Structure formats: C-alpha cells, structure tokens
C-alpha cells in the first residue's frame, strides 16, 4: 500500500526532505518506523528506537499500534516543536 509521509522540525532537517510517498507492507505505525530505520543512514539516525519520536495518522496523534491503510498520511516529528 502507499502511504504519504510528512516529516517535521529536526527530523525534516536530518532527512533533508519534508515529504515522501512510500510503498509499504507495514501493518502499523510501529512497523513502518522499523522499516524506515532499516534504511540506515539519516533515517536510522532520526528515527532510532532510543529517540523520542511522535507520529500522527491522518492528522490524529497515534501510538505505534495504529493500523495503516492505503493512502494514509503519516506525520513524523519530535515531541516538542516550535511555533
């Protein structure tokens, strides 16, 4: 399925991009995060398990057990962002 990722704040800066569309078989947000970390490089650095990362599914704050669906929008950001 395709999901649309939006990266914010320091995560966007580390990855060098604010958006991407990804084809994935990940069933949940947690599995998607693991898939992104497995890419290595900047993704592993920004999204590693020891780092505080918040995720939103279709603009609703969600935990990692939230189920992904075709065309979902996933926001990824650090827990504190400025205005």
Image (spheres, rainbow, N blue to C red):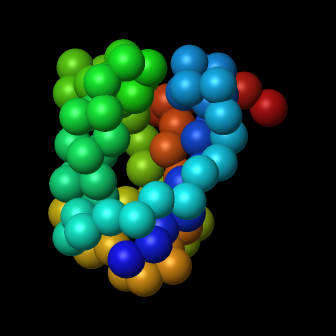
Q: Is residue 74 visible?
A: no
Left or right position of 7 against 43: right
Residue visible at 44% across and 20% down?
42
Left or right position of 56 against 8: left
- The part of the image, by quadrant, that contains residue 2 is bottom left
Q: Position of residue 4 (x, y in %)?
A: 55, 63
Residue visible at 55% across and 59% down?
21
Residue visible at 40% across and 28% down?
43
Q: Is residue 79 visible?
A: yes
Where's the N terminus, which quadrant?
bottom left
- The part of the image, by quadrant, that contains residue 25 is bottom left
Where's the C terminus, which quadrant?
top right
* For residue 30, above or below residue 8: below
Q: Position of residue 74 (x, y in %)?
A: 50, 59
Q: Position of residue 14 (x, y in %)?
A: 56, 18
* For residue 15, above or below residue 53: above
Decide which of 8, 25 is in the foreground and name it: 25
Residue sticking out furthest to the bottom: 70
- The part of the image, by quadrant, that contains residue 9 is top right
Number of marks in the rendered image: 0
* For residue 77, above or below residue 48: below
Decide which of 10, 43 is in the foreground and name it: 43
Residue visible at 22% across and 20% down?
50
Q: Position of residue 81 (x, y in %)?
A: 64, 29
Decide which of 82, 8 is in the foreground and name it: 8
Residue sticking out furthest to the right: 83
Left or right position of 49 against 3: left
């Amino acid at each position: 399925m395709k999901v649309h990722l939006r990266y914010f704040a320091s995560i966007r800066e580390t990855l060098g991009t604010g958006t991407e569309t990804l084809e994935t078989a990940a069933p949940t947000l947690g599995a998607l995060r693991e898939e992104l970390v497995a890419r290595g490089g900047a993704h592993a650095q920004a999204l590693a398990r020891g780092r505080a990362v918040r995720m939103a599914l279709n603009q609703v704050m969600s935990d990692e057990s939230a189920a992904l669906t075709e065309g979902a929008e996933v926001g990824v950001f650090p827990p504190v962002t400025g205005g």
